Image (cartoon, rainbow, N blue to C red):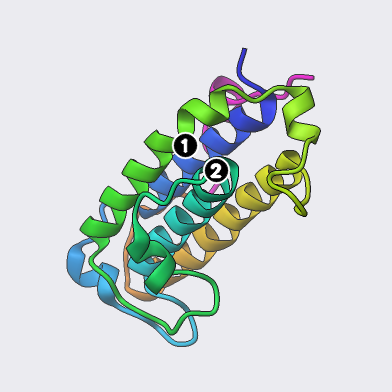
Amino acid sequence: MTHPLVDQLRFTRSEFKRGLRKVSENDGFKRIDPMNSISWMVGHLAWQEERYWLRRAQGVILIPRLHEELAYGKPATTPSIGEMWEAWDEVTKAADPWLDSLNGESMAAPLAEGFSSVGTFMLRTIYHYWYHLGEGLAVRQQLGHEGLPDFVGDIDGKAPWRS
């Protein structure tokens, strides 16, 4: 059975996609200072997942561009949102088998030597998604997008609490 935190990460990913879907290429480029562009947000979350679940956990760098352009502290960029969703899909699909292997013992272990536990990094990732989802929805509101999600989706059906 999938670890409950992995279920929560997957639910969070689905909410991120739900909140930022149907953003045009043109709107994905737009940056309303001091906020990031939506395309950057998508690529940045792909970078984080690659950094934790592929690079640190497994020694794999799938898309070097993510580290070069979208890592924390890099200058603001406005990449193609289509390219960033493709990168995000590739990274999350590559990370999923490793995430599926996690259990209570492996969640308590360090992500890599000298790092906090996998579980702590899982929580950091989940909260990071929610932070950028809020930022992305704020950008979408400023751009005049309508019909945006205004509450958490079907957590009862997709990722209810379980011990």
* Magenta span of residues: 150-163
* Left or right, 120 with reference to 3: right
Which residue type carries mark 2? Trp
Residue occupied by mark 2 = 53
Circle nearer the N terminus (2, 1): 2
Residue 153 on the magenta segment: yes
- Give the amino acid type for the residue marked by disc 1 in the picture: Ala
Relative to the observer, which residue lies in front, 161 or 106?
106
**Main secondary structure along the magenta-highlighted residues:** loop
Q: Is residue 11 above or below residue 47?
A: above
**Position in image of residue 62 (x %, y %):** 36, 49
Q: Position of residue 110 (x, y in %)?
A: 76, 43
Question: Can you give x and y, in whole percent of width and height, for residue 24 in the image?
Answer: 20, 62
Residue in the picture at 61% in, 31% down: 6
Q: Is residue 83 magenta?
A: no
From the image, which quarter does the N terminus lie in?
top right
Query: Residue drawn at (31%, 51%), measured in percent from left and top?
Result: 87
* Residue 33 to residue 137: above or below: below
User: Residue 150 at x, y = what percent?
Assistant: 51, 51
Q: Which is more toward the observer, 17 or 150?
A: 17
Residue closest to the far top: 1
Q: Which residue is mark 1?
A: 95
Q: Which residue is located at x 79 percent, y 19 percent?
A: 163
Specify whether 161 is left or right of 84. right
Quadrant in the picture for residue 144: bottom left
In-front residue for pair 51/153: 51
Which numbered circle lies on residue 153?
Answer: none
Q: Are marks 2 and 1 in contact (CB under 8 Å)?
A: yes
- Mark 1, secondary structure of its residue: helix
**Badge 2 element:** helix
How many C-alpha atoms fall within 10 Å of the one at disc 1: few (<14), some, or many (≥20)? some
